[in-house]
Image (cartoon, coloured by chain):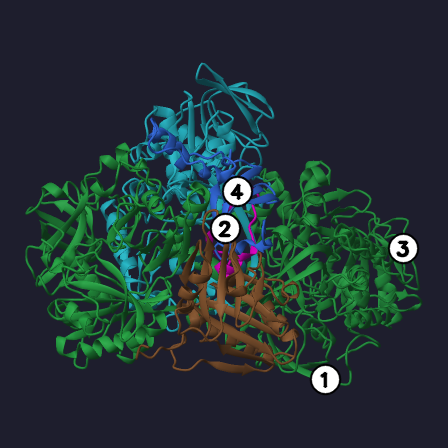
Amino acid sequence: MLIPHPLLGPRDAQEFTYLGDAALLNRPDGMAEGAEAAFAEYVYLRDNPAGVHRELWFHEQGDRSWLVVTRDTTTHEILGAELARDVKLKGGAA
Amino acid sequence: MHFSGLRVIREALTGHKGWKPLWRNPEPQPAYDYIIVGGGGHGLATAYYLAKTFGRARIAVLEKSWLGSGNIGRNTTIIRSNYLLPGNEPFYEFSMKLWEGLEQEFNFNAMVSQRGILNLCHTDAQRDAFRRRGNAMLLAGADAELLDREQVRAMAPFLNFDNARFPIKGGLLQRRAGTARHDGVAWGYARGADMRGVDLIQNCEVTGFRIDGGRISGVETTRGYIAAGKVGVAVAGSSSRVMAMAGMRLPIESHVLQAFVSEGLKPTIPGVITFGAGHFYVSQSDKGGLVFGGDIDGYNSYAQRGNLPVIEDVAEGGMALMPMIGRARLLRVWGGIMDMSMDGSPIIDRTPVEGLYLNAGWCYGGFKATPASGYAFAHLLATGRPHETAGAYRLDRFARGYVIDEKGVGAQPNLH
Amino acid sequence: MTDLTPITALGARAPARHAFGALTITENAGLALASLALRRDAAQPAPLGLALPGPGAWQAGQGVAAFWTGPGQWMIEAEERAAEDFAAVLAGEASGCSVTEQTDGWTAFEIVSDRGGAPIRALMEKLVNIDAAAFGPGSATRTGLHHMSVFLIRRAEDRLAVIGMRSLAGALWHALGETAGRLKGERT
Amino acid sequence: MTRLTGGLIDRARSLRFTFDGRTYSGHPGDTLASALLANDVRLMGRSFKYHRPRGVFSAGSEEPNALVELRSGARKEPNTRATVAELYDGLEAASQNHVGPLGFDLLAVNDLFSSFFAAGFYYKTFMWPRAFWEKLYEPAIRRAAGLGSLSMQPDPDAYDKGFLHCDLLVIGGGAAGLAAALTAGRAGARVILADEDFRLGGRLLAESHALDDAPATEWVARAEAELATLPNLRILRRTTVFGAFDHGVYGAVERVADHLPEPGRQVRQTLWRITARRAVLAAGAIERHIPFRNNDRPGIMLAGAMRAYANRWAVRPAKRVAIFTNNDDGHRTALDLAAKGVEVAAVIDSRPDARAQGQYRLVHGLVDNAKGRLGLRGVEIDSNGRKEWLDCGALGVAGGWNPNVHLASHHRGRPVWDEALQAFVPGEGGPCGLIIAGAAKGQGSTAAALRSGAEAAAEALAQLGIEARPADLPAAEDAPAGLRPLWHVPGKGRAWVDFQNDVTVKDIKLAHQENMRPVEHLKRWTTLGMATDQGKTANVTALAVMSELTGKPIPETGTTIFRPPYSGVSLSVLGGGDTGAHFRPRRLTPTHEWARAQGAVFIEVGPWMRAQYFPRPGETHWRQTVDREVLATRKGVGICDVTTLGKVDVQGADAGEFLDRIYANAMKSLKVGMVRYGLMLREDGTAWDDGTCARLAEDHYVVTTTTAQAGPVYRQMEFARQCLWPELDVQLISTTDAWAQIAVAGPNARRLLERIVDGFDLSNAAFPFMACAGLTVCGGLRARLFRISFSGELAYEIAVPARYGQALVERLMEQGADLGAIPYGTEALGVMRIEKGHAAGNELNGQTTAQMLGLGRMVSSKKDGIGAVMSRREGLAAETRVLVGLQPVDPAQPVLAGMHLFAEGAPHRTETDQGWITSACYSPHVGSSIGLGFLADGGARMGETVIAANPLQGQKVALRVVPPHFVDPEGGRLRD
């Protein structure tokens, strides 16, 4: 697989470490009411779609950027990749 | 039709005219008491035990493709009960006991072969962990032996003892573990269920659940609506998709695991050997192929195929462990979809929808669990109560903090 | 000056050097390294007169050079200044930045070809999944090599630097030497 | 030895080789199969199940029959296809899968009882008595099964891997592939042309057609010469592209030295991972056969293969041959062989209206039997009911051609049925960027293949924005095949569909009868297509037979796809050569060479090699050494390299806030110049990693992690920085390797360090427990000093630039000689930390909580640290097991990690299990073995006796529960 790094172009996926669903960007507020239920969902439940999936990859053997990659889980086709930092600053993975 | 050596001889002498279909191809009835969604190993075993052990009738198994086309049709055939945690070990040992005698019970040779599994260890800390695990196995009534380096060498002299990056220090051996002919298991259960009146309906995909007032009333399928008293879902690889139709999100991600077989070879290795430090495990099939695998590819996938780096990684592990396999050739690589759960352990439980039950999250270890999974799921469906060995496999264990995390890696499915 | 005697990453008093056909590999023990990262809202500096390069690039100056290592992050190299507190020098040149000493975190192997770029490309083909033909002079990147993580810098058509973690110097030397040795054995 | 005229062999040179011990000779350009045929050897192997005698069936990598063990000793390679093994001088080959000589295989008895071994028979018997399966039935089956055997010796050859990048990968160097390569190469694109053969040309080498009125081989030579001049094009001969992976990545194996007796200084094979922006699959087609009774006799082969042997290798398969065909292509074989002077007994054509195309006997009819157990002697012809035995030594069978869709289906895209071609062609869902050309997509005539290859390349380049004109191509034959399907010859007896696995038409009928009708059931029940050829010559025929039985058309009966690899790939080359000691790189500490010189014993710790202990002369057991190291450290001073701990430099205005969020405990409040123990949780609330956090300046911290978790913790810190809180001003960089970090522990630690620091006040008042500072040592060397202790003694860790680590240790040893300074390794380190009750990897195993570790109060509820919320879940809060110390009631008794704990008198079962021992050692300080463990309700059970059970090793030991601090429980030593 090749990951289209937004700064470095296509790179061997072997340089990356996979984490999973980009919803992990949306960490609940641990000090809020009902935090435990929110965290149980955040930590454990996944949409796990057969199709377009937004997911986190870490360019561990590269520039150490976390990326949000949009990929089809049925074909492995990659539809785009962004710096996770930018996605988060724009308001998260929703 | 009862299978026996005599029968084989008689048919051989009379041109095999007497063999009957292994199962019928029934048309779906309008309603059943029990519908099992998924005609893979776990679904077929569930139907079998529901009919045989729990004496239930009016049972159908709905399979979107051919019987046994799930992960039971593509795995590395290992059976074992070498678990650590009390939530797991008694269950897998129950499964092991069901394997022993399974073939005589369902009169079908699934080639259950207790040739042993040897987990190698390479550090003192690993040996400590193996001692803890081996003892946990013995406490649950399973068998286990802790071997030192020389005992391992006597069993498997072909391993790399002299020039290894991770020297072999010993191993944990379970002699009763081994392999079984995966398709044969599916067929044995299917035939046994069919003989007891279960309708095995192939090419029948469930496309929706009909839920009235929080209670299941039936399933929509590609072959029409079928009413049901209770519905049990056992669709490894598709669990999230199927349960989404009932409005549920699961603590599961779907990942691809590749498995490998070499060209046929004369007997080369005795039982199952696992090399944790190198992410490699191997056995040899009765046909002579080395059957081996390693880690999952590590990314969400429904594509049923993997990529080259894992193939290389697994081969590297194999060559590091047993360099004498180098001149053997890889014949085939295939990929299956794994329900990787958030703690690496399965779910056998009721759901918030009354009458709808879930059997899922087997990660890449569902094959060895097939008998116990079917038995426990049938128990749950028939009695409404979890089987005594499967009581920890609850859906709410994640939110409540009772996870069963054998590897201790937390809520990251690709590490389990 | 301290009276302690340093050793190279390969554990010797003197840097290693070996020729394999067209390629010569030399341990660059004198190279000083310091990382530089922009802090929030900091303007991009030009330390030691270097125009900091963009993603995938290496920029050489007089005895110093810089290569991009990540968004807002660079590694600064200085020839033959390993014995100095180069990070302190750099920090003085880059206010508003986080600077960290990195000299001893790495081992640099300089690979020089006496037959132009082809042997360098042939070596890269056997070691890294980076398109050697597209990795011309001035390119720099980090990638995997035999289960290790390395920086590659194409210093010139006939020169490649491979910078790996110091603790892996022996393993990296083995990988480079083994591959270069086999290339020599091949028909090239 | 019989050779025809012509051919692409070098008759000027002879190569000697042996087969089953007999010496023969061939020529450069031969394969083992062609050379054996040239020597009139027809019997080459035995089938898998019935051990039937078999000869060569094809002329390529689809070969199901002629499998041999090639080479000898550690280089022995089982299951090697004689049809692709390039002949070299001194080649040794042996037939396989037989007991006794090849001609008198004792296991051929299986064939006599074949009716007992029909499809699926295994599943119906061998069940009684149960114990007989492993002991009797299975071993017998396993010995009879399998094919070749391994040498059981390590592969002595070298392998490597590499990475190639191109605009266009052309797979296959036949007519279509050459046309594609010429088109793309001339356009200036970066092209790789790969072919599995040792010679480019593909089928063109096997045919007698003309291209532009000259032999096709002349055009091939010209094309090859032109390609060689293009700097942008690379030809990989002897290279099999075995798999198509995601995003244009292809796996290929180049057999660098398989055509040589030994590789010498080269690698034997190279694994190439090719990243191609586009690819053209020009893999040709594979001929299919027509099953009839006894159609597996040695001498019966594919008609196209027969033609290849005659034209390319100048080999006649027998003096007198016959052809059985359902299309015009079979007639070509007859013409080519006749032209070479081989006697053609007849062409038997199943099409009633077929016409002879030359001077040979044409029979309208079928072949329905064959005789000649070890080599064909004749075939029985059925011409409208008239039966006749026809003498012949070889029969060519031409059943039509199947496009070689293998790679096109690697992404599980299903081939589709082409009614006109009566064959499956690649369908939708193929690998992205892969364009199919030539016979692989049904463009089987030479002219069509050339055209299709050129067009495919132009199309691929157009997609990349590279302009290319299809290459101008020579005039070539363009005849239709005129095929009329004939899938098998009806009749009694066994007619083979899958040769290697002995699957016959009858087996398929039985599968149908037993309702094993879906194609996957058919394959699994009969083992069809499961052999080393992946059913390349069997699958489509089997589908057609099943389709006849079900009455459904072939496409409704099913399709079949292939999986990587295209043909067998040696595990050696997939492993790529990094095996043995170089399987994974080893990380060495800055004092590694020094430790080695001291005679240290090393141990693998994750990727690192660490000194485990430093034996001295006279010490005969490792325990002696470790006890000495521990006692000497606790009495004087010990020195240990702890560089392997992860170190992360954290800077920025918000560094403190950031660390507050990633640690369970507070770090923002840490004073500059101080160190704090830090505990990290996973977001699920489980204890994850621990270490120290030192504040060097207001905006500068240094975090240490455990050795094992250095990578994951750094990754998690970057995740927190980039994905959770990018608004914080924080910069991270690892400095693990940059600093040699040396622990100096023991009552004399301060005195020793005072001798090397440059005027730094080490007094307890000036530099108390948990202080840190930057300073210089040994006359101006930059250093960092941390007053932290893992051993429980007065201790420091001193860090200097890594290249000075060894010199520093030497200096410390020299300066500490009179203070009793000794080096200690990881064993002594472990003993001292157990004696002090510090948690390490065995306790922090990812399954335990802060509460279990006795650190529950460290988890702050006043801030939103990672994992804090989930650590409060019901199940975690209800956990009563806590870390305790354990000491044997009888000091002579052993304590071992992994023992399980039980209340006295309780049965030893899963249900009564109260915990386990995590770490244990012999404590020279206590004078007995001691352990740490998690015990249910352990905090309330001090002084109680519990039973540690180790049924695995037959041990039961009574242990007293004690606090987990065996040394200096008040902590006076480390604070003074």
What residue is disc 2 on? Answer: A65
Q: What residue type is labelled 3?
A: Ala
Element type at marker 4?
helix
Is D717 a magenta residue? no
Q: Position of residue C144 (x, y in %)?
A: 51, 62
Q: In which quarter of the image is residue D599?
A: bottom left
In front of the other: D192 or D390:
D192
State the quadrant of the C terminus of chain C: bottom right
Element type at marker 2?
loop
Chain corresponding to green in the figure: D
Q: Which amino acid does label 4 sit on?
A: Asp
Q: Chain B hue?
A: cyan
Q: Chain C hue?
A: brown
- Residue B201 relative to residue D379: left or right: left
What residue is disc 3 on? Answer: D479
Chain corresponding to blue in the figure: A
- Residue A70 relative to residue D783: left or right: right
What's the residue at 54%, 24% (across, down)? B208
Element type at marker 1?
loop
Q: Are marks 1 and 3 on the same chain?
A: yes
Which residues, given as a range, are shown in magenta? B286-315
What residue is disc 1 on? Answer: D14
Q: Where is residue B230 in the image (x, y as percent from the top left)?
A: 44, 22
Local packing at callout 1 (Cα closer than 10 Å; few below 14, some 14-19, many 20+) is some
First reached walking from the N terminus: tag 2 or tag 4: 2
| Viewer-side label of 2, 1 | 2
| Viewer-side label of 4, 3 | 4
What's the residue at 49%, 68% (across, down)? C77
Q: Are marks 4 and 1 on the same chain?
A: no
What's the residue at 94%, 67% (across, down)? D213
